[in-house]
Image (cartoon, rainbow, N blue to C red):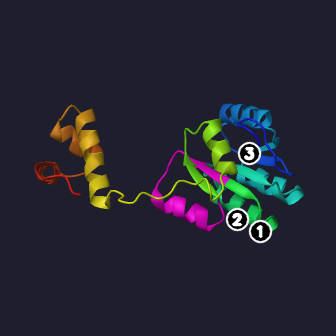
Amino acid sequence: MTSGSELDVPDKSLLIVDDDKPFQTRLSRAMEARGFVVSVADSVAEGLKAIDQSAPAFAIIDMRLGDGNGLDVIVELKKRRPDARGVILTGYGNIVTAVTAVKLGAFDYLAKPADADEIFGALMATDANKPEPPENPMSADRVRWEHIQRIYELCDRNVSETARRLNMHRRTLQRILAKRAPR
């Protein structure tokens, strides 16, 4: 790989599968500027058809499309071209879908809104430049507590409103707020 904006790989084919037309257009232009030969699809069906015609070396695929799940496109891409690098994008990020995406062959998983630099970085990442996992990651209890605290602050410390937004009983929330932060 050369410096930031140009690509130094033999096959620069890239398929972008996203039903958000303005985003698809911006991303397509940004990736062409980085040296990719871009083709686009608006749906799972179009994505599968594009892969059937010519499986690209790279793919950027939205998880939720009007006619189905973008993971179906990743699965087909990896069948047709095992060395392809696919990145899944979604506005509905969670750990389970991220793990599923990677198990099905996605190289990475990014939450929307992701910019072209983040996506390019994910496409071109190697094991050598992937960040190391943290030595002491937060526990699940701590992550939950931090999330509750964030929503509580955003609701101007209103317990009833926070409980409503978190879909929990007010008394349960009060008990959680009264405890010390988990480690």
Q: Is residue 76 left or right of residue 144?
A: right
Circle 3 sits in a helix, a strand or a loop, which is it? Answer: strand
Q: Report the front residue among 148 and 162.
A: 148
Question: Looking at the figure, which quarter contains the C terminus?
Answer: bottom left
Marks counted in the figure total 3
- Contact between marks 2 and 3 (CB within 8 A): the answer is no
- Residue at the (83%, 53%) spot, across then down: 50
Q: Nearer the viewer, residue 109 or 121?
A: 121
Dot 2 or dot 3: first in sequence order is 3
Q: Are marks 1 and 2 in contact (CB under 8 Å)?
A: yes
Residue 84 found in image quarter: bottom right
Q: Nearer the viewer, residue 157 or 81?
A: 81
Indicate the quadrant where residue 157 lies.
top left
| Magenta stretch, residue numbers | 87-106
Residue at the disc numbered 2: 75
Which amino acid type corresponds to the residue marked 3 in the rendered image? Answer: Ile
Label 1 belongs to which residue? Answer: 79
Q: Residue at x 56, y 48 (%)?
A: 110
Cα–Cα span, label 2 and label 3: 15 Å
Q: Residue at x 27, y 59 (%)?
A: 141
Q: Within 10 Å of the Cα at label 2, are there few (<14), some (14-19), or many (20+) other Cα atoms?
A: some
The three-letter code of the residue at mark 1 reads Lys
The secondary structure type at the circle numbered 1 is: helix
Relative image position of residue 119 (x, y in whole percent): 64, 43
Out of 167 and 135, give the one closest to the viewer.
135
Lateral position of residue 162 relative to residue 49, left or right: left
Say left or right for 91 vs 157.
right
Instruction: Using the rendered image of the protein, determine whether residue 53 is visible from the camera's viewpoint.
Output: yes
User: Residue 158, how many percent across, how many down?
Assistant: 17, 35
Give how far across and how far down residue 167 sits, in percent.
27, 49
Identify which residue is drawn at 69% across, 49% down: 124
For disc 3, the marked residue is 16
